[in-house]
Amino acid sequence: MKFNIALLAGDGIGPEVIDQAVKVSDAVAKKFGHEITWKPALTGAAAIDAVGEPYPDSTHEVCAAADAVLFGAIGHPKYDNDPSAPVRPEQGLLKMRKKLGLFANVRPTFTFPSLLDKSPLKKERIEGTDLVFLRELTGGIYFGEKGRRDGGETAFDNCVYTRAEVQRLAKKGFELAMTRSKKLCCVDKANVLETSRLWRETVQAMEKDYPEVEVSYEFVDAVAMRLVQWPNSYDVLITENLFGDILTDEASVISGSMGLMPSASMGSDIALFEPIHGSYPQATGLNIANPMATVLSAAMMFETAFNLPEEGKAIRDAVNKALAEGVVTEDLADGGKSFGTKEVGDWLAANI
Amino acid sequence: MKFNIALLAGDGIGPEVIDQAVKVSDAVAKKFGHEITWKPALTGAAAIDAVGEPYPDSTHEVCAAADAVLFGAIGHPKYDNDPSAPVRPEQGLLKMRKKLGLFANVRPTFTFPSLLDKSPLKKERIEGTDLVFLRELTGGIYFGEKGRRDGGETAFDNCVYTRAEVQRLAKKGFELAMTRSKKLCCVDKANVLETSRLWRETVQAMEKDYPEVEVSYEFVDAVAMRLVQWPNSYDVLITENLFGDILTDEASVISGSMGLMPSASMGSDIALFEPIHGSYPQATGLNIANPMATVLSAAMMFETAFNLPEEGKAIRDAVNKALAEGVVTEDLADGGKSFGTKEVGDWLAANI
Ligand SMILES: CC(C)[C@H](C(=O)O)[C@@H](O)C(=O)O
Ligand SMILES: CC(C)[C@H](C(=O)O)[C@@H](O)C(=O)O
């Protein structure tokens, strides 16, 4: 098969980890007889520096025309201290999500047996954890009307959801649950918020279409607790944008394998794949960043965007082998022998 | 001194734990020569059953006329499955907060050395944790306009904050930080929300009035992570209502001492004290509920509402002694000898 993949390396360690994912993807393509054409485009602080905005139209055109988007990381310290600066890398992220219609952010949290001791949680709490959040990504308070009144003395942010927005996200949740343990948790704050009540009633009405899926409803504050207490009691969780922002980040640290966690953002036409970690500006250019989360994001891309599970598995197997044999960057080396970003990428590509 | 204290026992285990706090407070009053008049009033499901609403005017009058409010817990399973039921215990809670003007919820999370192994976190992560959240409690998305449009197909919740609301909460935060390690963290989502930008600029403008306080600004998603990774890196945190709801609950489970955590909700005129745990309906009447969180809430009442630190310390000392001597309910007994709710209360009162 032939694929055009938009390549948005972004800022900080983005370009370095993206390079390894490209290398590994090319090795997979070669092995399985596919042809990938990479289409690099600017985003983040790099795009602000070059053309004055973080998600320029030229980049959007590349993404919209591609079969998938592979994304590194964005964010630069020079934009950190003034959240109200007129142009910020994050705005590019939000614009990209909206314009590409990426309404479902898929955030798995799973454990690697060899890394359990990296978790801040006790081993017996974290063992066997394998959950996936589906976070709504193009609605809610992120995109509602916002502004000031009373000469700036009053600020407001409006949170809005339509039934159709909830349905399309929930549908993905039910479908994902059917391929897993058939357990779905709808996370809301229906005891306080009207949007949450819409979420809950919409999901409740969909239950009859998926009679095998066991659905539970939990308040966001209760989930924030149970994620730390018994993360392995969850399987698929669906939630709105802001709750998802908070809870997926909370979930990412419990596994102790944050540097390895991939993610996908899916729409009706196109999907984007990226590591969950940030741009770690301090590590830029040092060849120390862990490329595995980005490499595993490429695995998700083969599996979900191209429907090629064998290709994805080849990547996952290589990563597991690298972990088993200690071919890891310093964050996972426990003071022992470690490898550079590039060397880990080379090893993975050679072991496809 | 003479005090009138409104006593809102509420639902489930509320009445049982409240009884112990009354007993212990009376022992303190006796020892230090104070006189307490308890003013019981209905709230929660108990009030709905009796008079059809969860925070009746009669209860409000009792609270408004009191020197402080001691609160048990509310919530009953018969209201659990329908978050849109017209009358729910939680609505009483929100009405009470608003009508009493309880704008600052004070939620400490601290550790008891003898209970560290109860934490889901590894010992070295949790040791020494002693942080306090100040959660804004009468504004934000909880109280903004909410409703439906388009024949019910679209739902909205408006989040609104005024500068004055942020200022009065932040002022309490700065003042609290001055009595502690002089570190204050403002938690927001200023990279996305206009209300968060108002929070941040308001707190930034107050920094000059507290030159000794070192202020940091963190995004809510980052705090959700670091609370699990390095809870002991925080001291005083201030945040808006919804973020506070999620993060204070998350923080409460990391200590492993959730059954012991007290809280206060403060306004300009009156303050309310309550354990952070819920009404645990399954334990109702079994004399097994841990009364220590409520007893420690009474300690906070003496300290902060009545400005009587010695009296508060007498209670804390008794609780520490009970923990050291194993006079605990079954949740803390590790399968060993345990005591009933009432017996723990009696022991604490006798040891004042
Ligand atoms: C950078 C920020 C706008 C973004 C978000 O809140 O969605 C980030 O936290 C994320 O989760 O991707
Ligand atoms: C019951 C609910 C309305 C309430 C809240 O969200 O404030 C509770 O979770 C709390 O934190 O006291």
Image: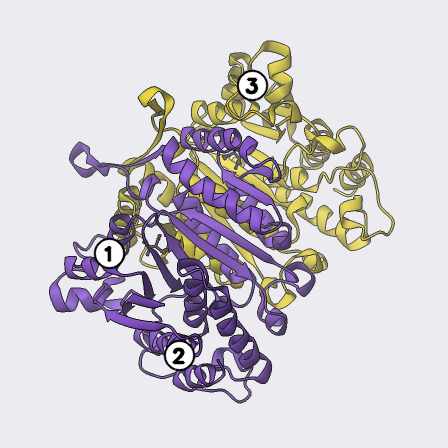
Chain colours: A purple, B yellow
**Coordinates of residue A343 in the picture (x, y in percent):** 42, 87
In the image, residue B19 above or below residue A239:
above
For mark 2, name the chain: A
Dot 3 and dot 2 within a common chain: no
Left or right, residue A226 beside residue A248: right
For disc 2, the marked residue is A30
Residue contact at pointers 3 and 1, CB within 8 angstroms: no
Dot 3 and dot 1 within a common chain: no
For mark 3, name the chain: B
Find the residue positioned furthest to the top: B51
Q: What residue is at 61 percent from the left and 62 percent from the top?
A: A121
Closer to us: A345 or A239: A345
In the image, residue A316 above or below residue B345:
below
Q: Estimate how packed mark 3 is, as few (under 14), some (14 to 19) or many (20 or more) residues with alpha carbons within 10 Å.
A: many
For disc 1, the marked residue is A64
Residue contact at pointers 3 and 2, CB within 8 angstroms: no
For disc 3, the marked residue is B54
Please tell me which of labels 1 and 2 falls first in the chain: 2
Q: Nearer the viewer, mark 3 or mark 2?
A: 2
Q: Identify which amino acid the numbered label 2 is placed on.
A: Lys
